[in-house]
Amino acid sequence: MYDIPNWKHEGVGVYTNKSICMPRRGHGSPQMSFAAEQLLDMIAEDMGMDPAELRLKNVRKAGDVLPNGDRLDSCGLRVGIERIVEATGWKEKRGRGNYRGIGMGLSAMFSGAMYYPFASAAIVKLNPDGKATLFTGQSEFGQGSDTAMSQIAAEELGLDLEDIVIVSGDSELCPIDLGGFLSGGVYVSGEAVRRAAEDAKRQLLQVASEMLDVEVGSLQIEKGRIFHKGNPQKGVSFAEAVRYNIQKHNGDPIIGKGFCKPVPEVEFYPSLTKGAGRFTDAYGFTVAVAEVEVDPETGRVKVERVTIADDCGQPINPANVHGQLLSQVVMGVGDALFEEIVTEEGRIVNASFEDYKIPGVHEVPEFVHIPTGTFEPKGPFGGKEVGEGARAAVIAAIANAVADAIGARIYSLPITPEKVLEALEAKKRGR
């Protein structure tokens, strides 16, 4: 996220006898953002500088190349910070006291990574009734992938959404797809779908060119009709072209194939063995601002509002984007304030929802969404990651907002009432 031209890090793995770790939304980035984004605020405080201004001076921009070689063809961090500062009344609310605070957090997330063999393929079959059947291995489990994949196919083919019949998640019928993880749904699976639809469209236009006796380049498809750009009256329906192809070529179907692999110029992912190298083709970015109120008597924190300026490129489905972000706001509130695995002598003692606190409906804050409107040239119709990165920014924003509210920092999660009261007491004692 930040313009650091060179970096070096060392990591040490520690084996414990506690419960094993598993990937969760964000894949480790929330923990790092919680620490790094608080450090940014602490640096700003020491410099007597607005934390938003410090971030604005140091965030990356489109065209930057990261130290590992990843290139940012799109990056909405600068415009995101500018818009969110204005929309939230940041300057007026910052440091206002009375146990009310406002804080900012930034995050980045890859759009599908090079973990071998992360890739996706899709098939589009054109039907004689004018519809198209899409086969994709991407599985729908509530994230809206069936809708997004169908929209991408419909847009490329020039059909209405209801003209797409989708077959998804069937490993016997559908081509390879490594699944809905690593935020590669739209960017990787969606691009495979777009390429499959493009391949089918190319074949269909060739058939229509033969039917109408015109050049392929002079044809256009819109709402299920293929017509001459200079003479729209001269055309055929999608269904007529498919049926003509079946009759003329003894039943030969029109089937398009598409395949997409992140960072295609690199055959294997070098970081698995060398700890270096390219990682992804595109990053999604989030700027989050949280507004909180702290009760100094009980230490309880209430998150009143979370505003997110997100850079997911061009949203394929705005409703899906809103849902993805809101769900990450709720998860971020849980991570920041409630969720904790408690162990005693290596045993988990809060292994049920009776003891493991998660946000309820009363803890869900007001949510405001500000799109940044960037365009990712390598993504399908300009789209990229939106499903994971915001969670990290929300956690960091809440932590910084609490610090703004009470004038003291809390360095571990979750930010419980006990920790808030301890921080207030330490501040009172001048520690």
Image (cartoon, rainbow, N blue to C red):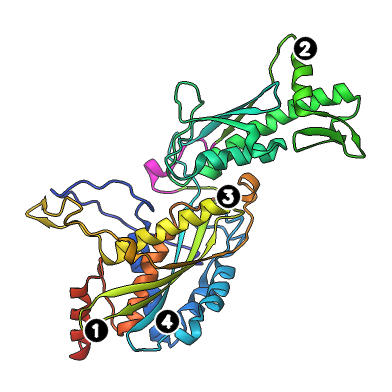
Write the start and end of the magenta stretch as one range: 261-276
Q: Alpha-carbon neighbours of circle 3 within 10 Å: few (<14), some, or many (≥20)?
A: some
Q: CA distance from mark 4 to mark 2?
A: 72 Å
Taking the image as shown, residue 194 lies to the left or right of residue 319, namely right
Point out the tag, 1 or 3, that comes first from the N-terminus: 1
**Amino acid type, mark 1:** Pro
Q: Residue at x 38, y 81 (%)?
A: 101
- Residue hosting label 1: 296
**Amino acid type, mark 4:** Ala
Point out the tag, 4 or 2, that comes first from the N-terminus: 4
Q: How many marks?
A: 4
The image shows residue 40 at horizontal and vertical percentages of 40, 74
Point out the tag, 3 or 2, that comes first from the N-terminus: 2
Taking the image as shown, residue 158 lies to the left or right of residue 209, namely left
The residue tagged with tag 2: helix, strand or loop? helix
What kind of secondary structure does the magenta stretch mostly adopt? loop
Taking the image as shown, residue 159 lies to the left or right of residue 110, namely right
Q: Are marks 1 and 3 in contact (CB under 8 Å)?
A: no
Q: CA distance from mark 2 to mark 1?
A: 79 Å
- Residue hosting label 4: 44
- Residue hosting label 2: 247
Q: Is residue 232 above or below residue 76?
A: above
- Is residue 369 at least partly visible in the picture? yes
**Amino acid type, mark 2:** Gln
* Residue 156 quadrant: top right
The residue tagged with tag 1: helix, strand or loop? loop
The one nearer the camera, 1 or 293, is 293
Q: CA distance from mark 4 to mark 3?
A: 37 Å
- Residue hosting label 3: 317
Q: Residue at x 66, y 38 (%)?
A: 154
